[in-house]
Amino acid sequence: MFEEPFMRRALLAAVLLGPLCGGLGVFVMARRMSFFSDTVSHGALTGIAVGLFFGLTDPTLPMLAFSLGIAGAILWLKQRTALLTDTIMAILMSGSMAAGILLITRQKTYVGDLHRYLFGDILMIDSRDLWLAGALGAGTFLWLWRQLSPLALLTAHEELAHVAGISVSRLNWGFTALMTLAVTMSIRLLGIVLVTSLLVIPAAAARNVSRNLRQHLLLAVGAGLAGGVGGTTLSYQFDLPCGPSIVMTCVALFLVSLPARNVVRSSA
């Protein structure tokens, strides 16, 4: 397996992106932002469609731009309208998906490329993706290390965080930008349809067996790593699609965490 260059790149991508999504997933789950990340990932379809429409062989830049644009639009509309957050996200997700599909249907050779982006393809991972994932992972964990306490307070009680002098708006924008970049970078490995699962499932499994925030964060990082590497390995060994293999590995970890939860509680 390690003799194949594409598998080495895929495993390294899983090592970089699995822990990254697992760590961010702790706050995504606690802040009930699972639908937010789903909206951002589906919004990336428009960026992919624009890139393919203009003949780009690599639509990474328009995909990143549209994902960040969708995330920014959610926060902007949330601050300036009386609409509920899930209503805003439903509008933007539906609109961006429709725009992307309309653009894609104008092309004659879209099916193969679209399938790869919808469900992930380890063959799409290249050296540039690994450098971007490495830089994003290092920057995210440095940011989390410096902002862990303010972010924890913001997650627990936004008004209390504001009273404590925390720049709530800047913290929200920073976390949203990092989460959006992590989701977008993971699309190549997992696909648009499944990428949110790498944010949510490892964090949920870790929550079952953790006793405090720091333990939750460390276990979620480990679960993300195990899910990413385990799923990528199973994908190669059994000739399975990479994205669904990673998701099912994460689901297996979650199922194991359910009985482990009783053991942790009884020993507390």
Image (spheres, rainbow, N blue to C red):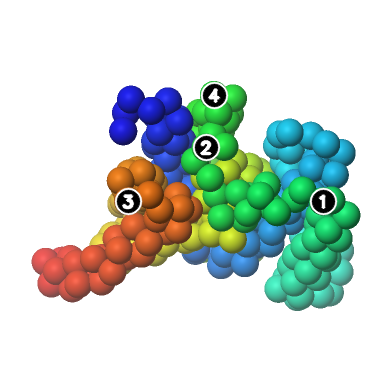
Image quadrant where residue 95 sits: bottom right
> Which amino acid type is marked by label 4?
Ser
In space, the residues marked 1 and 4 are separated at their CA atoms by: 29 Å
Mark 1 vs mark 3: which is more N-terminal? 1
Task: Give amino acid for label 2.
Answer: Leu
Q: Give me the C-alpha separation between circle 4 and circle 3.
A: 25 Å
The numbered mark at residue 78 is none
Residue beneath label 3, please? 238
Amino acid type for the residue under numbered disc 1: Lys
> Number of numbered discs present?
4
Q: Give the residue type at disc 3.
A: Phe
Can you tell which of label 4 and label 2 is closer to the viewer? 2
- SS state under label 3: loop
Q: Quadrant of the C terminus?
A: bottom left
Q: Residue at x 73, y 33 (%)?
A: 57
One can see residue 36 in this view: yes
Residue positioned most to the left: 267
Please provide percent x and percent y for residue 76.
82, 57
Q: Residues within 10 Å of mark 1 (few under 14, many from 20)?
A: few
Q: Provide residue 142's location: percent of width, then percent of height.
A: 49, 32
Task: Kindly identify the residue that appears in the image at 74 percent across and 38 percent down.
Answer: 59
Q: How far apart are marks 1 and 2 (CA)?
A: 22 Å
